[in-house]
Image: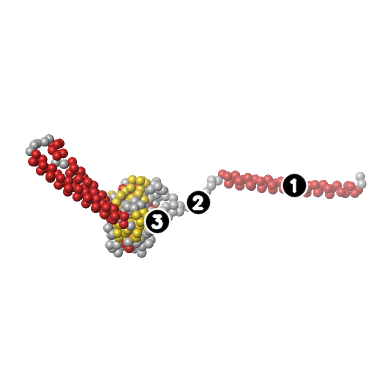
Amino acid sequence: MPASSLLSMPTLRGADVRQRGRFTLGALLAVLVLATGAAGAWWLVSQPPRIERRAPVETPTALVDTVLAQRQAAAPALYGFGRVVAEREARLASRVAGELLEFTPEALPGRVVEAGSPLVRLDDADLRLNLREAEATLAQAEAQLAMERGEQQRAESEYRSFGRELTAERRALVLREPQLRQAEAEVERARAARDRARLELERATLAAPWRGMVQARLLGAGSMVANGTEVVHLVDVSRFWIRVSLPGEALGWLKAADDAGPGSSVSLSTRTWPGGEARHGEVIAMLPTLEEQGLQAQLLVAVDDPLGLESDAPALRLGDVVRLEFDARPRDGLFALPAAALRPGDMLWVLDDEERLRRRTVEVVHRGETRVLVGAGLEEGERVVTSQLGQPREGMRLRPRIADRERPAGEQQVPRS
């Protein structure tokens, strides 16, 4: 063996020993780390979780508005809109034929005329001739009657001088009684013809049948008119009507005029009047037909002296749209509450003695925009919540405003519903 090989063998053996020592130390360190991790994991798993207990945070109670429920006599505020129409109007027509000569100065559209005032004059020349002819015919018939009465007297004298009794029929013929009745009938016929001719002459002048306002002239002077031709449009100014539609349930709160007394009072206003001006009317009828569009009930309201001719009241004009507020009849034993207090399903929220929220299902008598009327389902003195609640729960605690605890619902400054 060469000397160089013998010298290198100890060196190789020492390097192998050092390499083996390194591997043994690394393995021990790895096992030690794994054992430590396993022990830590076992300790974490074996220990129960520890939750730190904290005092619950108290939720602040909500502040709400309430009103005190009190029974009282109450009525809803009913209002609607209606159009003004004429109670009575007429289109005066000629009852005789002829030429329209002129309109009188009173027949000016917009002018008020009294009953009997002449409005239109027709050509009456032919009618005057007819009257003269009828008067002449009457005079002739009266003369014929007078002569026949003379003949009857002569026949009666002869009959008496004859000295014999005849039967009733023979006696009537001898005394000319049929001829006398015929002459009297001719006089009546001639008198009727005279009266008819006189009446037609009077009808040549058209007069106002009642106090009214001339609405329009329907023809012009010089027009030929026949029997029945309309000439003047006249409107009665003593009273106008207003036709108004209301929900059907409103009829139970109102009364129409009858023999027992007047109807419900109504206050009227319109945009054409100065601020604060109002008129008063009366419900006179509840019509049997429903309004076509909304199927609502229809009422008639009457307003006397609508043009303000007898007073300084503002004038109503035909066709104008007016706002009507009805004076409804109150009913006893109702709760008047703000509309905000009513919840879906005809339900109210009330506060009990422990300031906790309770539910009440009630009978709603009337629903208005700002107020509701409640009948049954609520007790006297209960506090009704009017505030809006985000998530109301039965029994939740609330805090009412101090100012509202003793305020009755009827004392709230809320307009009528």
Q: Do the residues labelled 1 and 3 touch (CB within 8 Å)?
A: no
Residue holding disc 2: 52
Q: How crowded is mark 3: few (under 14 residues within 10 Å), some or many (20 or more)?
A: some
Find residue 4 and report its horizontal and vertical position in percent: 90, 49
Q: Earlier in the sequence, mark 1 or mark 3?
A: 1
Q: Earlier in the sequence, mark 1 or mark 2?
A: 1
Residue holding disc 3: 63
Residue situated in front as seen by the camera: 315 or 175: 175
Q: How is the structure coloured here?
A: secondary structure
Residue situated in front as seen by the camera: 362 or 78: 78
Find residue 64 and report its horizontal and vertical position in percent: 39, 55
For residue 246, the mark is none
Residue at 80% in and 47% down? 16
Taking the image as shown, residue 349 lies to the left or right of residue 26, namely: left
- Amino acid type at circle 2 is Glu
Residue holding disc 1: 23
- Amino acid type at circle 3 is Leu
Picture mark count: 3
Q: Nearer the viewer, mark 2 or mark 3?
A: 3
Element assignment for label 1:
helix
Residue at 91% in and 48% down? 3
